[in-house]
Image (cartoon, rainbow, N blue to C red):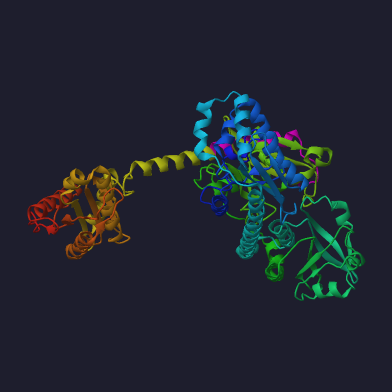
């Protein structure tokens, strides 16, 4: 969240750059080498990318004064915003007689956004220092206010401030250029990854909707200003079948739909033949081909070459060679699916599948529940395109959980903040939004999408009490009419039922979290005594069905002389030793085994399907591992050696119930303690009673 405009950048908590972030480390290093303040500010309002490094105590004192604080905001805060807007650097003496610089950089575009560095904040000579003392006295500050500032005072000649400004800017621009290259490469990898993920997802698309799904998916993933799905209607032309709008002000939907592409041009024919995709940015050729005059570049990709070509045109979209190869492969894959589906299309239409039974509202899976909500909302409204977005509690953002008219893979990474866009605004207000004609709503114009066939839509919040749990979005009534109040009345009970169902799922999850927390030992992360008692009873019942074919062994483990560790090194060191023992037991057992902390320094280990001989081998290995380990802790100067004693019991030889099995293992543990510790003891099997 950006800082409020009335907060000085030095006081802002910058979420984007925590203390350990790469930029914060660079900023602190530069500030330390120059012995001056340094901070970086982004956006038109000049929000801090990180708190200022080495911001002097003089500034804190000035900001605490009403009159001086106002001048600080005017000179520094507003000065940063002015420099970002104008692109002009500033080097000035502030009202507190400190030398301050503001150095803007960047081109103000998507590749290099305009930013600025603010720094310096030093006295250039003793005359400036004396001027500050006089100014502070005029403000009413006395010696008790100024004396604590003395250790923090820094003095650097004006040339040193100017040199530091130039060096900091050069290093910052180099660092950010490298960071942006890394970010671009990461974003590209993520986009390509999504393309390959949805290869399989395309197979679930109806064959008639698959080309449109490809167009929308590419438009969303690659942030296209506009896209066209072109279909062959005659021998010399491609006409627009569908459009994609990325909210670019350059392209009007009506203009895009009137486009007809001349297929006699060689570079267009190359695309129709499925040749390797290449960008085309010759303005004259683009106009001659029939693209809108606002087009500066076109990327063409063929989905199907025969019998009727289908071509995707991405307008004014910047792609890398890797992007092009991946998109080309993606489109060819879609074409193959269309050919395969066309063979079975007639059979599917003649013998329709009745589909699975409706899913139940009481499902514990949020994705399944969202699909049920979507199905009910679409059936009630007759919408051709719809989505269900639920609030992610941890992120406090809306996430698409179910969608109709577009595959979920295309939008599963999308997150919408509270108050952002139409869905975020409905979330914030908690009231439904019915729009009969978006063209008559000027404030909604930026959100208009040409991929919707009608201008009417509904956003219905899913509300429970004073909480908004999600939003149902509906567009494009299948009969072409606008949504009306009757649709809202039909959706209201569905949204209410959805809210109750979502609340049940959240309650179940919260209960499960509490249940797990109640069964987890806070110190070691192992399961606790309550979990052990329950699991022991379950395992004993399971083993009793086939006692000799399915033996169950139990280890009771105790740290030797643990009281001496606590008395000698303290409780904190004792806790470290308990954690080390728990880790050793966990690492020394198998996946099917389970380790518990019963309390204090005592542990238990359940070994399903384990005979006495196999359990003895494992227990002795645990003893050796603990004896060989040295616990290193920050609370003691030297490593600590520990040993453990283990009592072993096995069902059915040592008992037929959970109580008798634990009793025998505990008796064996006491025998191990009496025999000298650091050993495993198992008692002789008791004779079976007739």
Residue depicted at 73% across the width and 46% down the height: 84
Q: Position of residue 471 (x, y in %)?
A: 64, 40
Viewer-side residue, 61 vs 422: 61
Residue 546 counted in the magenta span:
no
- Does any portion of residue 241 appear in the rendered image? yes
Number of numbered tags placed on the structure image = 0
- Provide the residue span drawn in magenta: 477-501
Q: Position of residue 225 (x, y in %)?
A: 78, 55
Residue depicted at 84% across the width and 53% down the height: 251
Above or below: residue 20 compared with residue 3 = below
Q: Position of residue 356 (x, y in %)?
A: 58, 54
Give the prevailing secondary structure in the magenta stretch.
helix
Q: Using the rendered view, name the quadrant where residue 472 is placed.
A: top right
Q: Residue farthest to the front?
A: 127
Quarter of the figure with the C terminus = bottom left
Viewer-side residue, 53 vs 175: 53
- 505 sits to left or right of 316: left
Quarter of the figure with the N terminus = top right
Residue depicted at 61% across the width and 34% down the height: 130
Viewer-side residue, 349 vs 414: 414
Residue depicted at 86% across the width and 56% down the height: 257
Residue 485 counted in the magenta span:
yes
Q: Position of residue 239 (x, y in %)?
A: 86, 63
């Amino acid at each position: 969240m950006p800082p409020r405009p009335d907060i000085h950048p030095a006081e802002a908590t910058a979420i984007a750059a925590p203390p350990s972030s790469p930029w914060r480390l660079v900023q602190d290093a530069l500030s330390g080498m120059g012995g001056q303040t340094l901070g970086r500010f982004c956006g038109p309002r000049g929000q801090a990318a990180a708190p200022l490094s080495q911001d002097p105590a003089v500034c804190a004192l000035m900001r605490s004064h009403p009159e001086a604080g106002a001048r600080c905001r005017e000179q520094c805060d507003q000065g940063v915003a002015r420099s970002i807007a104008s692109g002009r650097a500033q080097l000035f003496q502030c009202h507190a007689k400190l030398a301050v610089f503001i150095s803007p950089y960047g081109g103000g575009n998507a590749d290099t956004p305009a930013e600025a560095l603010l720094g310096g904040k030093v006295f250039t000579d003793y005359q400036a220092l004396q001027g500050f003392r006089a100014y502070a006295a005029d403000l009413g500050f006395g010696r008790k206010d100024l004396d604590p500032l003395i250790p923090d005072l820094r003095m650097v000649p004006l040339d040193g401030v100017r040199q530091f400004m130039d060096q900091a800017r050069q290093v910052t621009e180099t660092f950010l250029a490298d960071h942006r290259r890394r970010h671009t490469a990461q974003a590209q990898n993520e986009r390509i990854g999504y393309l390959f993920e949805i290869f399989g997802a395309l197979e679930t698309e109806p064959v008639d909707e698959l080309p449109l799904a490809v167009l929308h998916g590419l438009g969303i993933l690659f942030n296209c200003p506009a896209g066209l799905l072109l279909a062959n209607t005659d021998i010399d032309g491609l006409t627009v079948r569908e459009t994609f709008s990325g909210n670019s002000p350059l392209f009007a939907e009506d203009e895009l739909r009137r486009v007809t592409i001349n297929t006699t041009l060689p570079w267009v024919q190359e695309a129709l033949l499925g040749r390797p995709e290449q960008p085309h940015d010759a303005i004259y050729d683009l106009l001659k081909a029939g693209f809108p005059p606002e087009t500066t570049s076109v990327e063409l990709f063929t989905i199907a070459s025969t019998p009727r070509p289908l071509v995707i045109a991405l307008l004014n979209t910047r792609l890398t060679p890797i992007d092009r190869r991946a998109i080309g492969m993606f489109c060819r894959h879609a074409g193959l699916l269309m050919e395969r589906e066309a063979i079975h299309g007639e059979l599917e239409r003649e013998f329709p599948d009745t589909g699975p039974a409706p899913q139940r509202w009481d499902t514990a899976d949020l994705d399944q529940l969202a699909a049920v909500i979507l199905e009910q909302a679409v059936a009630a409204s007759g919408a051709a395109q719809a989505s269900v977005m639920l609030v992610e509690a941890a992120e406090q953002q809306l996430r698409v959980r179910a969608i109709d008219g577009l595959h979920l893979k295309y939008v599963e990474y999308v997150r919408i903040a509270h108050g952002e866009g139409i869905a975020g605004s409905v979330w914030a207000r908690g009231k439904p939004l019915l729009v009969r004609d978006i063209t008559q709503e000027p404030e909604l114009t930026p959100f208009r999408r040409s991929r919707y066939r009608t201008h009417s839509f509904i956003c219905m919040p899913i509300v429970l009490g004073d909480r908004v749990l999600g939003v149902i979005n509906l567009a494009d009534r299948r009969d072409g009419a606008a949504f009306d109040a009757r649709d809202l009345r039909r959706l209201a009970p569905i949204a209410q039922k959805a809210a109750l169902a979502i609340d049940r799922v959240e309650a179940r999850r919260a209960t499960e979290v509490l249940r797990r927390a109640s069964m987890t030992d806070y110190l070691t992360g192992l399961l606790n005594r309550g979990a052990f008692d329950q699991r022991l009873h379950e395992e004993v019942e399971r083993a009793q069905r086939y006692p000799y074919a399915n033996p169950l062994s139990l280890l009771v483990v105790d740290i030797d002389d643990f009281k001496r560790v606590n008395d000698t090194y303290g409780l904190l060191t004792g806790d470290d030793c308990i954690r080390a023992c728990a880790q050793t037991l966990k690492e020394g057992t198998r996946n099917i085994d389970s380790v518990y902390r019963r309390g204090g320094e005592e542990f238990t280990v359940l070994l399903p399907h384990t005979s006495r001989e196999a359990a003895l081998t494992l227990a002795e290995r645990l003893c050796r591992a603990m004896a060989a380990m040295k616990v290193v802790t920050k609370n003691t100067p030297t490593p600590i050696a520990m040993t453990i004693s283990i009592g072993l019991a096995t069902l059915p030889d040592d008992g037929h119930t959970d109580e008798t099995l634990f009793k025998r293992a505990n008796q064996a543990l006491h025998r191990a303690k009496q025999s000298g510790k650091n050993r495993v003891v198992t008692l002789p099997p008791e004779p079976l009673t007739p």
